[in-house]
Amino acid sequence: MRGAGTGVTGTSDGCTFACTPWTSTAGTFTCRLVSLAAVGGTSIANGAKVGLMARANLASSAATVFLDVAAGRGAHFMARAVDTLNIADTHQSPATQASGLFGNTFIMSDNSKPAANYLLRPVWLRLTLSVDTWTAFTSLDGVHWTQVGTHGVEAVGAWVGLAVTSHQSGHYVQAVFDHVTGFQPDTFVRIGSV
């Protein structure tokens, strides 16, 4: 999946979103991020993010949850509880040795190399929904999971999918996902400024 965007931050998002409608109050959504790379010889910014996202609607200021892998920063779980509020960011918590997730051990911290693959190894991402509570998990093997965080966000889940943002308008990053389960992205949209 290739995409651009001004970022998922503040009160308004700019990203590329491959998604599907979701109407249930429960669900488990999983994917494995295989690679993250800059496109076209540009360097990748620390704000570049890719991962699993759910949104109340397709407006740039929609209530949102986003479990992302960010270049130079590792995994984060972000949430905008209500439309137009600032998005809150939960950093990756320390992980157990069994999961293998120690800080940024799976993401390259040097963002100066053009067109590099910034993922040191594949990482699994999972979002679970129970009524209005979203919980995020990461794993290196798809078996041992580490909880990243939980957010209570009402009315989120009308759209679930994969999101990519370069954090630089007009610059693109490419993410390769596999093992996508729980949803099938069938709509490709640009949210906000790309």
Image (cartoon, rainbow, N blue to C red):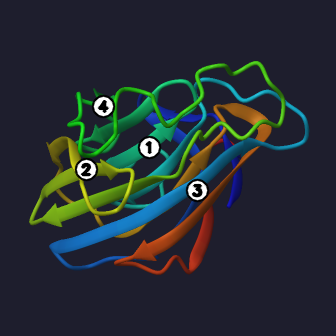
Q: Nearer the viewer, residue 35 or 28?
A: 35
Looking at the image, residue 75 sits to the left or right of residue 126; the answer is right
Residue 101, image x, y percentages: 34, 37
Q: Nearer the viewer, mark 1 or mark 3?
A: 3
What kind of element bears circle 2?
Answer: strand
The numbered disc on residue 68 is: 1
The alpha-carbon separation of the residues under discs 3 and 2 comes to 18 Å
The numbered disc on residue 3 is: none
Asked if the residue at tag 1 contacts the one at tag 2, i.e. Cβ–Cβ closer than 8 Å, the answer is: no
Question: Most extreme residue toward the right, as rendered?
Answer: 41
Q: In this view, does 154 lie above or below 119?
A: below
Q: Nearer the viewer, residue 86 or 72?
A: 72
The alpha-carbon separation of the residues under discs 2 and 4 comes to 10 Å
What kind of element bears circle 3?
Answer: strand
The alpha-carbon separation of the residues under discs 2 and 1 comes to 10 Å
Q: Residues within 10 Å of mark 3 (few under 14, many from 20)?
A: some
The alpha-carbon separation of the residues under discs 4 and 1 comes to 10 Å
Q: How crowded is mark 1: few (under 14 residues within 10 Å), some or many (20 or more)?
A: many
Quarter holding the C terminus is top right
Q: Mark 2 points at which residue?
A: 136
> Which badge, 4 or 1, comes first in the chain's sequence?
1
The amino acid beneath tag 1 is Asp
Q: Mark 4 points at which residue?
A: 92
The amino acid beneath tag 4 is Gln
The amino acid beneath tag 2 is Ala
Looking at the image, residue 184 sits to the left or right of residue 25; the answer is right
> Which badge, 2 or 4, comes first in the chain's sequence?
4
The numbered disc on residue 34 is: 3
Q: Is residue 143 above or below residue 114?
A: below
Q: Nearer the viewer, residue 12 or 25?
A: 25
Q: Nearer the viewer, mark 3 or mark 2?
A: 3
